[in-house]
Amino acid sequence: MVETKTLPNTDDGLRRAAETLRDGGLVAFPTETVYGLGADATNDRAVARIYEAKGRPSFNPLIVHCADLEDVKALVKWNHLAQAAAEAFWPGPLTMVLPLRVDTMISRLVTAGLDTLAVRIPAGDTAQRLLRAFGGPVAAPSANTSGQISPTRAGHVVDDLSGRIEAVVDGGPCTVGVESTILGLAGTPTLLRPGGITLEQLNETLGTRVSERRATDKISAPGQIRSHYAPRARVRLNAAEFEDGEARLGFGDIDCDLNLSKAEDLVEAAANLFEFLHRLDATGAPVIAISPIPHIGLGVAINDRLSRAAADR
Ligand code: TXA
Ligand code: MG
């Protein structure tokens, strides 16, 4: 057991967080998408502790977070599609998978032995300041026990990982609320995980059609494992009506326990998604029933996470 400190996102708090990373410690921090569980990406021991703290069943590859483009280019082989995507969406909720350069110090545990690396420049102000204070690449999966709901508040991280990590930087709620979109650019441009940037946005920016990963394709991102993001309660999707005893998660102008967005705003719904699942799960209700969510824009990422939460375990 380690004592988990909650640090404020002040200059002093971030300086202490960066020091903890330098010492090989685990520091959870907010990005604009979800809270990440950070470690020095060049320190094998620190990265191994991420897997241990999350109880990840195997060494699934992690996303490396950088402060700016120069730092990213030192880690991966760059190409013109990556450049176009970076100009349009970084800093922001997009992760790109690119060939790993051979001359980096990135721990093998980060890539799980693959010859590609997932990289992202987060937009969140706290994340940016922490990355600059640390001054190197930070490996970070979502800061939750493997298979559970991703955290969008410092309190979610404390409830879940307290005693297993050194610190949590409290930067308030995450603004996007679903994980980054993962774009594979090591070969044919491929959408590996829907997220904060939509497929339509990518197609338009890249001027090429990004292929969608088919369900039969080999799993190349564990976020693609069907049962994931799972609350304790059973999850019932596309609930046209709610039944007695169910915790009711609504969308639109309906009567429910918590409403993702009364105004049917998908951006608002994404930002509320994980917090509301956490809250309804905490009521102890056996079932969380959820209104249909339109399958457009950010709704694609929301429905992806919900179908995983509802999958058989
Ligand atoms: O928004 C996010 O992306 C958050 C914040 C903290 O940045 N992070 C996040 O990390 O969602 P995680 O570990 O929960 O999901 C990372 C996904 C996994 O599904 C992993 O398999 C995939 O990225 N991934 C990492 N490296 C990869 C690679 N080289 N090739 C293919 N997929 C990769
Ligand atoms: Mg995750």
Image: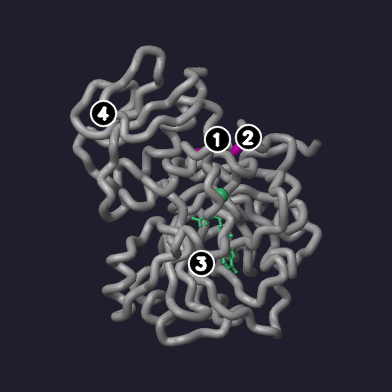
First in sequence: mark 4 vs mark 3: 3
Q: What residue type is labelled 1?
A: His
Residue, far top = 244
- Residue tagged 4: 240
* Front tag of 4 and 1: 4
Number of marks in picture: 4
Number of other residues with Cα within 10 Å of mark 3, as a class: few under 14, some 14 to 19, many 20 or more: many
- Mark drawn on residue 197: none
First in sequence: mark 3 vs mark 2: 3
- What is the x, y in percent for residue 28? 61, 48
Residue at figure coordinates x 74%, y 69% from the top left: 108
Q: What residue type is labelled 4?
A: Ala
Where 45 sits versus 169, above or below?
below
Where 108 sits versus 9, above or below?
below
- Residue tagged 2: 160
* Front tag of 4 and 2: 4
Tell me the element at label 3: strand
Q: Does the residue labelled 3 lie within 8 Å of ligand 1?
A: yes
Q: From mark 4 to mark 2, how far is it between C-alphas?
A: 32 Å
Foreground residue among 156 and 29: 156
Q: From mark 1 to mark 3, how far is it between C-alphas?
A: 23 Å
Q: Which amino acid does label 2 sit on?
A: Asp
- What is the x, y in percent for residue 94? 43, 64
- Residue tagged 3: 120
Residue at figure coordinates x 61%, y 75% from the top left: 116
Residues drawn in magenta: 153-157
- Residue tagged 1: 156
Residue at figure coordinates x 57%, y 76% from the top left: 71
Q: Do the residues labelled 4 and 2 touch (CB within 8 Å)?
A: no
First in sequence: mark 4 vs mark 2: 2
